[in-house]
Image (cartoon, rainbow, N blue to C red):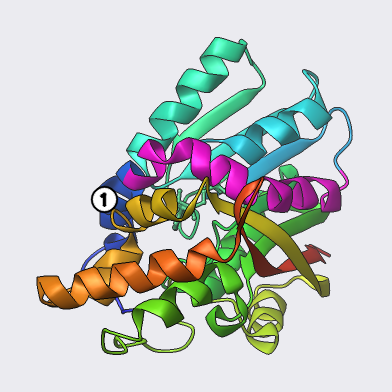
Amino acid sequence: MVARPRFRGMPNEDQAKYWQGKGGEHWVSERDRYARMVAGFGDAVVEAASLSPGDRVLDVGCGMGPTTFAAADRVGPSGEVVGVDLSGPMLGVARERAEEAGLAHVRFEQADAQVHSFEPDTFDAAISRFGVMFFDDPKAAFANIAAALRRGGRLAFVCWQPLFENEWIMVPVAAALEHVPLPEMGEPGAPGPFAFAEQGRVEDILGSAGFKNISLEPLELPMRVGSDADDFVAFAKTSDFADTLMEGVDDATAAAAWASVREALGSYAGPDGVVLSGKTWLVTAIRP
Ligand SMILES: C[S@@+](CC[C@H](N)C(=O)[O-])C[C@H]1O[C@@H](n2cnc3c(N)ncnc32)[C@H](O)[C@@H]1O
């Protein structure tokens, strides 16, 4: 959606500010909703990484750790899972969860995966659920991740297919656009949720970073975005959706736009809540 303001300085500084601040806090406060919305995509990543007991795993952009913990289950106490993330608030939740569960083979580091000095040739697998689309320099980031993998190490992640093909975002956006102007879409491929939407670009980035056997499989799953349309609207009002579409819009227009969103989402409500589909790429590759 709208390109975020760029800050000069260290790599990914604008993303670090966002995930350390508003973005991270939003994910923490909506943690149960996000967990339920995207759980199936994490299961697919962990499965695709073919983890075995004793493996060492790197979880890139681990957030509050759901995939870190799922990987930890697979590798068992003889293995180790390291979650890295930019977001202090999200890692705070992850660390609390690890402590509560008494998991000694899980570790979290607040770091930028693009530049962090990982121990080289160490990990059997690197995984990510929606944590790899935010790099300023994705080729450098994936080269850094590749260097952390041992030879033959596996990469598995999910990223979104194009915004326009994703019902979970397009249904509410299209409804709001009946009333508000189309926002600036930003440069295609700019850091953000849809940066890896284009298959050829992902193949090029991973190939340049030294990965082989690169595969992108479409993975479409239902996403429960709210218990009902009102619940979704309350959530959307605190999210980037509101910042992007409603910024500078007068109150009456905004109210009409939210009413449209409510009505559109209502037609997807059923006994399991409001369910829309999400289209992703399940990406796998090997460090040769
Ligand atoms: C959409 S959230 C996904 C979080 C988690 N993987 C999940 O599925 O619940 C994206 C995550 O990527 C992290 N992230 C973005 N850029 C990063 C970077 N350069 N290094 C490490 N983490 C990053 C953010 O802080 C955020 O937690």
Can you say which quadrant of the picture contains the C terminus? bottom right
Instruction: Using the image, determine if residue 123 lies above or below residue 92.
Output: below
Foreground residue among 30 and 273: 273
Instruction: Using the image, determine if residue 1 lies above or below residue 127.
Output: below
Counting from the top left corner in percent of width and height, residue 115 is at: 45, 57
Instruction: Using the image, determine if residue 6 lies above or below residue 177.
Output: above
Foreground residue among 213 and 121: 213
Foreground residue among 4 and 104: 4
Q: Is residue 190 left or right of residue 197?
A: left
Is residue 27 located in the magenta-colored stretch of the structure? yes
Q: Is residue 205 left or right of residue 91?
A: right
Q: Secondary structure at mark 1?
A: helix
Counting from the top left corner in percent of width and height, residue 155 is at: 75, 58
Residue drawn 75% across the image and 52% down it:
45
- Give the residue number, with chain letter if any, for mark 1: 22
Residue 6 visible within the image:
no
Counting from the top left corner in percent of width and height, residue 79 is at: 77, 26
Type of secondary structure dominating the magenta stretch: helix
Residue 132 visible within the image:
yes
Is residue 43 located in the magenta-colored stretch of the structure? yes
Q: Residues within 10 Å of mark 1 (few under 14, many from 20)?
A: some
Residue drawn 48% across the image and 60% down it:
114
Counting from the top left corner in percent of width and height, residue 116 is at: 47, 50
**Amino acid type for the residue under numbered disc 1:** Lys
Q: Is residue 250 left or right of residue 203?
A: left
Can you say which quadrant of the picture contains the N terminus? bottom left
Residue 260 lies in quadrant: bottom left
Residue drawn 35% across the image and 86% down it:
178
All told, the count of numbered labels is 1
Residue drawn 65% across the image and 40% down it:
67
Query: Which residues are the magenta region?
Result: 26-50
